């Protein structure tokens, strides 16, 4: 069995907009208070550091705080699970990171957002994409067809040599690189909390915030 692990979205706005879009007013302070309610008091200093590391406590306004919270939520709920899954899958694993920016007007224009890979893959919106984005979609589609046909779409990642295929953005139609955050367009920050606060703790606290707790 093979695993195609993907990391396609810097911002999970398309998903979290429903839960948070109406809560933007004062969201930075609300988020900080929620984390401190839902994470052990012994970690208060770490919570403050996390809020500073992601620019939430220093955000200039509610919109900036909202986007910073989405970045953190992406790392907790999507980036970490993908990384864990890719590193521990028993069979061949092919990791890709899509860094193509959302081209459509709206609050998430210019960001790589959830489901954009689906639009590129199925070509439903090609009439509204420029030539560069269409080329990214062609390359993505060809590679996924290879994968589902039982062929290696690119070099598999391993624990000894973690690699990822990056496409979109500066990588255009694809580049195989060492799978480190700074080389694939991601952040190191969340990895600093594995052995201190713990990722499960962070995930539970973030889900509690989404639920209004």
Image (cartoon, rainbow, N blue to C red):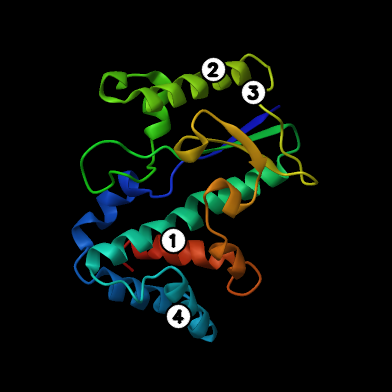
Q: Secondary structure at mark 4?
A: helix
Q: Secondary structure at mark 1?
A: helix
Q: Earlier in the sequence, mark 4 or mark 2?
A: 4
Q: Secondary structure at mark 2?
A: helix
Label tally: 4
Q: Earlier in the sequence, mark 3 or mark 4?
A: 4
Q: Nearer the viewer, residue 5 or 34?
A: 5
Frontmost of labels 3 and 4 is 3
**Mark 3 = which residue?**
153
Q: Quadrant of the N terminus?
A: top right
Residue 88, image x, y percentages:
71, 45
**Mark 1 = which residue?**
72
Frontmost of labels 1 and 2 is 2
Q: Earlier in the sequence, mark 4 or mark 1?
A: 4
Task: Name the residue at the right extreme.
Answer: 160
Residue 184, image x, y percentages:
57, 46
Residue 188, image x, y percentages:
57, 61
Q: Earlier in the sequence, mark 2 or mark 3?
A: 2
The residue that appears at 43% across and 75% down in the rendered structure is 52
Residue 33 position (above or below residue 107): below
Residue 104, image x, y percentages:
25, 36
Disc number for residue 142: 2
Frontmost of labels 1 and 3 is 3
Q: Earlier in the sequence, mark 1 or mark 3?
A: 1
Residue 27 position (above or below residue 137): below
Disc number for residue 48: 4
């Amino acid at each position: 069995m093979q695993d195609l692990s993907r990391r396609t979205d810097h911002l999970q706005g398309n998903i979290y907009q429903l839960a948070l879009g109406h809560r933007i007013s004062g969201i930075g302070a609300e988020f900080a208070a929620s984390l401190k309610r839902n994470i052990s008091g012994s970690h208060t200093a770490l919570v403050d550091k996390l809020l500073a590391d992601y620019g939430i406590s220093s955000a200039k306004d509610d919109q900036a705080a909202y986007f910073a919270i989405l970045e953190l939520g992406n790392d907790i709920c999507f980036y970490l699970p993908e990384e864990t899954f890719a590193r521990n899958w028993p069979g061949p694993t092919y990791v890709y990171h899509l860094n193509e920016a959302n081209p459509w007007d709206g609050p998430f224009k210019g960001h790589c957002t959830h489901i954009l890979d689906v639009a590129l893959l199925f070509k439903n919106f090609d009439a509204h994409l420029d030539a560069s984005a269409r080329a990214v979609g062609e390359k993505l589609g060809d590679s996924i067809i290879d994968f589902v046909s039982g062929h290696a779409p690119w070099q598999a990642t391993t624990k000894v040599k973690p690699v990822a295929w990056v496409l979109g953005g500066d990588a255009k139609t694809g580049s195989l690189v060492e799978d480190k955050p700074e080389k694939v367009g991601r952040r190191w920050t969340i990895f600093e909390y594995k052995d201190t606060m713990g990722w499960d703790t962070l995930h539970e606290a973030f889900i509690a915030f989404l639920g209004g707790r």
